[in-house]
Amino acid sequence: MVRYILKRLLLMLPVILGVIIVVFTLLYISPGDAASIILGTSYTAESAARIRETLGLNQPYLVQLGKYIFNLFRFDFGDSWVSGVSVSSELITRLPRTLLIGSLSIVITAVFGILLGVTAAVNQNKWQDSLCMVLALLGTSLPGFFFALLLALVFAFTLQWLPPYGMGGPEYYILPVVANALGGVAMLARQTRSSMLEVIHSDFIVMAKAKGLRRRDIIYRHMLPNALIPVLTTIGMQFAGVLGGSIIIETVFALPGVGYYLVTGCNNRDYNVVMACTIIISVAFSLVMLLVDLLMAMVDPRIKIQFSEVKHGRGK
Amino acid sequence: MPELSMGIVSEPAWKKQNLFVEVIKRLSLNKSAMAGMIIFIFVLLIAIFGDMLAPQDYAAINPSEANQFPSSEHWFGTDNMGRDLLSRVLSGCKWSVLIGVGAQLIACGGGIILGCVSGFFGGKTDQLIMRLCDIVQAIPGVLLNITLAGILGRGIPNTILALGLSGITGGTRLMRSSIMAVRKNEYLEAASAINCSNFRIITRHALPNAFAPMIVSFTMSIGSGIIGASALTYLGLGVQAPNPEWGALVTAGRNYLISAPYMTIIPGLCIMLVVLSLNLFGDGLRDALDPKLKK
């Protein structure tokens, strides 16, 4: 297992390095002049030249890239062009909020997605099934930000139960998390239903029924564990949706996380911010995917065996 | 020689038509897929004729009628500048559909080319393309959309490009796997034995037999393209304000969420309806094209 973890970690490094190079290159070749953004209205040719000199923007591409990667090891993303504040200090305060929204959303996604899917599958072709699947279909068709606006309209403006936007206590997180979980719940419910239906007619289920086990035990101890592997893969894939979705949802609820920072950076053409946010979210995503894969290896012995075969070969 | 090449060309064409008829037959039995198709055809008609159907000019400002709730005169109400929302929704339809379809044409086009090359040639080319895909897919989709849109700038062509480019990796993986599935078939060996060029083998023999998953993916992704475009517009990175694209209508409505909620809800429901119809149709198409059902 340790070997597997190490191998996966090593495989992750070139991907992250690749992401950094791709994002850096894209922003390097795109139009947008740092000096004119930093100076704003007080733009003169001399001061612009001075700023390019101090930022090292006159240097060749490879030197700039090398310096950027070198600085990354010290968690230094440079300063924001617009506000002049260090990007990494902003990220340190903002990242926990985004990760909190992401992890809470994924928990809600997993719980409600599996519940809806199981309910639909065990009541196949009854009204519960139709209801769950119609809800799931609507959920996948609804744009996340529109659902967020509807939630704000109902729970914040009309009922006034929850704050509509901003930052504060835990109540500020409820609407963003619910809005962010919607797409995932819908997708997961559909996946759970179809993989539950695959095991529901298996012989061991007939056997469990014949033994006279309780219905709840059959569903949660015999069916669900056997249907769980594709469901876990879907949950893993939902992390991409949840992290990406949180960018939009944070903007809707004006919640100062990494996503809101990124969108502000994009709108201001503040490339240092855009680059830092893209890299940090991608790294977070890669780490989470690694965790999901490790979890999968623990649940599904077949995956672990693929990697331990090499070891056995050498041992003999 | 003419007879020989005739024989080879007409064989798959005959088969393909048969499969096509078969798929249509299966689709027509699927009620929800048919409902989805009818709704989408309806949306396409609105996209084409929306400007003619619109009761008023979508840009006509009329401050005396601002912020009216839906009524018999203005079915969808009016916005903050007194513009008729029904006309705006009808005229905006073509932009939403155009962005969704355009983005997927780029994504699927790029995906087909890269996926065919990768899946057919294998080896180092395949390794290179797949490692690049790994890197790009380490960036979550929405994030890639936003970053690309931020770099390319606003406007409809740039939005299409941003959404299309970020979809290429998904298309590549899909196409690669289905090309690899047909690659070991004997008719490809036969084609290369009669000295077909690689290009001809790919386009005439491998691709037509590996195309079904791509059609499903194309149908389903148009919906996510429309959602993606509206989200970009909402973030201020997509379509610009005077354009009545549906995402822009939702965005314009958010400032009047309390006083005029219909300004947000109606265009939002329109987006949902289109995406829903495509999802229904795509689900049906996937089932109809499923080779497991073939008898």
Image: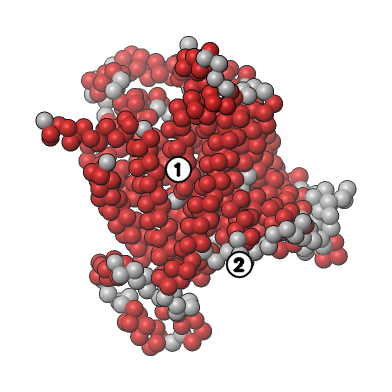
Name the residue nearer the viewer: B95 or A78. A78
Extreme residue in the right direction: B72
* Tag 2 subunit: A
- For the question of whether residue B37 can be seen, the reply is no
Q: Amino acid at mark 2?
A: Gly
Image point (61%, 67%), residue name: A168
* Tag 1 subunit: A
Image point (44%, 68%), residue name: A92
Residue A115: where, in percent of width, then height? 58, 35
For mark 2, what is the residue? A168
> Which numbered disc, 1 or 2, marks the residue closer to the eye?
2
- For the question of whether residue A4 can be seen, the reply is yes
Q: Amino acid at mark 1?
A: Met
Crowdedness near tag 2: few (<14), some (14–19) or many (≥20) residues, C-alpha within 10 Å? few
For mark 1, what is the residue? A237
The span from disc 1 to disc 2 (Cα, nearest Å) is 30 Å
Whether residue B125 is situated above or below residue B120 in the rendered picture: below
Query: Callout 2: helix, strand or loop?
Result: loop
Name the residue nearer the viewer: B49 or B96. B96
